[in-house]
Image: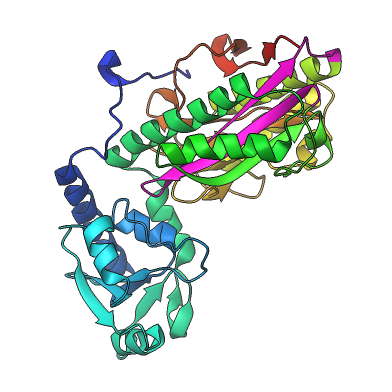
Amino acid sequence: MAQMITESNGEPIPDVSLNELDRLQDVQNKHELVGRFLEANGWDALLLQKPSNFAWMTSGGDSSRRGMAEPLAALFVTADSRLVIANNCDSPQIFDEEIPQLGFSLKERPWTEPKSSLLDDLCRGRVVASDTGVRETVNASAAIRNLRMRLTGLERARMRIVGRHVAHAVEATARTLELGQSEAEIAGQLSHRLVHRQVTPVQIQVMADGRGERHRHWSYSGDPLRQWCVLSAVGCRWGVCVAAARTVCFGPPDNELKESYQTAAMVAATGIFFSRPGTEISRLFGRVRRIYEKFGHDREWRLCDQGEVIGYEPCDASIVPTNHTPLAAGMSIHWHPSVGPAMMGDTILIADNGYEPLRPVEAWPQLTVAVKGVSIECPDLLVRAP
């Protein structure tokens, strides 16, 4: 039976990177995992170039370069070594700020030389797998994604911290925004709150006055807020992503919004209840689809994605009828069903004996939904004075 799991001992979560020794052990455990992965497939080395995989292997290092497609560094991992590939301009930042004293060695090149020449030297004479398939390497991106989807203890602790900050940023923005402000102004306030907590905004949505009914993946515009809006954010810190969405209304919501939101909450609660270890994603999707059909909204699930496994990418695995991947304890799911103009969203961690919502327990209205006799708490509409 689904059970909501809370933080151990009820202690507050510290806003720190936890013990660096924990991080070193996390890196060493992943190196051993990669070693077994290489041996099982008959490969000599693993080349990781995507920032999400760099963050995973380094337990939180950031190789991204803001505003640039090319990352600062790559990793070349064998059974007995882990190398950072970077130029002389970027290597000090990588080793001083991103991966200090974590047992990585450096393969450096001058910034005037192409990185491809160093990659050629490393890959020559070896059977190399990679997350991109570049330079005649074996494209193992799907297998690497599967390795990282089950989060370690350190990663789960970090998800809790990020979840608290993302939910707080969304909720605080909803409490303080004003009628007449543009969607872009509100998005700026939300982004500011995230960056203030060292959380990188990966995706921001501000959908005013029902815009989301027609444009489900809307971001924001210069149009003003006149009555109500949905705020949604995906934030990232230490490489891990958490998402949340909330809805605020000025004055009582009309019947269409209220009924649509309650149906969306029922869909989300059903998804949460059945997000259990061993359940195939395709079967989980079937449970959600039946709720849409039961409430006469069988068309809605066809209009937009319902959720995904979230972690080092905003979407590590989509919840779709063709995905037969089994869920496991330690995975995290972002549920964000939408019905007409209404959308709700929350992120949960899957546990062996229940689930854990990644959001703070604050004074936000709650909507209790019963699924198979079990009460699931979902965020409700926030109604402010007009």
At horizontal 70% and vertical 44% (from top left) the residue drawn is: 219
Task: Please tell me which residue lies in front, 108 or 32.
Answer: 108
Across and down, in percent, residue 124 comes to 32, 90
Task: Please tell me which residue lies in front, 340 or 107.
Answer: 107
Across and down, in percent, residue 279 comes to 51, 36
Across and down, in percent, residue 133 comes to 48, 76
**Location of residue 314 with respect to 14 vertically, above or below:** below
Quadrant for residue 261, please give it: top right
Judge whether residue 77 can be spotted in this image: no
Task: Please tell me which residue lies in front, 188 or 306.
Answer: 188
Q: In the shown orientation, is residue 288 left or right of residue 140?
A: right
At horizontal 18% and vertical 51% (from top left) the residue drawn is: 24
Task: Please tell me which residue lies in front, 108 or 50.
Answer: 108
Residue 121 counted in the magenta span: no
Q: In the shown orientation, is residue 51 left or right of residue 305?
A: left
What residue span does the magenta drawing correspond to?
226-255
The overriding secondary structure of the stretch rendered in magenta is strand
**Location of residue 86 with respect to 214 vertically, above or below:** below
Task: Assign the C terminus to one quadrant of the image.
Answer: top right
Across and down, in percent, residue 197 comes to 40, 36
Q: In the shown orientation, is residue 181 left or right of residue 97?
A: right
At horizontal 60% and vertical 49% (from top left) the residue drawn is: 323
Quadrant for residue 372, please give it: top right
Judge whether residue 60 can be spotted in this image: yes
At horizontal 78% and vertical 36% (from top left) the residue drawn is: 212
Residue 237 counted in the magenta span: yes
